[in-house]
Image: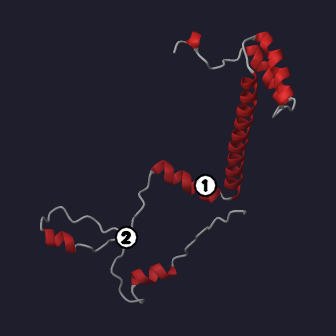
Amino acid sequence: MSPATSSRWCPTPEQLMILEELYRRGIKTPNASQIQRITAHLSLYGNIEGKNVFYWFQNHKARDRQKLKRNLIKQQQLQYQLYHPDLHYLQQNQSNHHYPILNYFDPPPPPPHTSSPLYSLSYHKSPAFPPQEGLEGAPAQMMMNHPWKVDIPFSAA
């Protein structure tokens, strides 16, 4: 479809300026008579129909809400970072350095030097769970005495 026969309304700069000014002044959802008056006034500056005015206000209001929501989310994220700087630093560090996350439930791949299918099926020893001696053993004792720090964020609901 060529631009000359396009059925889509393309507002002139003057029409846009007037519509935006009306919106700024508080007309967010014009009623039928307001739409008729606005359409009559805007027709002085180019081709326009009442439905164009109606949809322009509807779309502009929706975009305003989306923008407001995005700004609110950004503001909440900034406030959260102010109150939880260590968590923000951790997230930045992880995203910048791409540290691998260990999956403790998957067995490691078999060593490359073995080709025996039986050996690869029986190879489920995971370095993530080293063999522990008793509770009196050094690795177990180190694990028990480690000062674990866990921050659990609570949402304000």
Q: For mark 2, does the 10 Å Cα neighbourhood hold few (<14), some (14 to 19), or many (20 or more) residues?
A: few
Numbered-mark total:
2
Is 117 on the left or on the right of 99, as rendered? left
Residue at position x 87%, y 29% in the image = 25
> What is the residue that sits farthest to the left in this orientation?
116
Callouts 1 and 2 close, C-beta under 8 Å: no
The amino acid type of the residue labelled 1 equals: His
The amino acid type of the residue labelled 2 equals: Phe
**Picture coordinates of residue 107, whole percent (x, y):** 30, 69
Q: In this view, does 87 lie above or below 147?
A: above
Q: 44 or 133, which lies in front? A: 44
Q: 101 or 70, which lies in front? A: 70
Q: Image quadrant for the C terminus?
A: bottom right
**Picture coordinates of residue 99, whole percent (x, y):** 43, 55
Q: Is residue 133 above or below residue 65?
A: below
**Judging from the image, what secondary structure is the residue with disc 2 in?**
loop
Q: Is residue 73 above or below residue 116?
A: above
Q: Quadrant of residue 52?
A: top right
Per the image, the residue denoted by label 2 is 105
Residue at position x 45%, y 84% in the image = 141
Q: 49 or 131, which lies in front? A: 49
Q: For mark 1, does the 10 Å Cα neighbourhood hold few (<14), some (14 to 19), or many (20 or more) residues?
A: some
Per the image, the residue denoted by label 1 is 88
Is 15 on the left or on the right of 93, as rendered? right
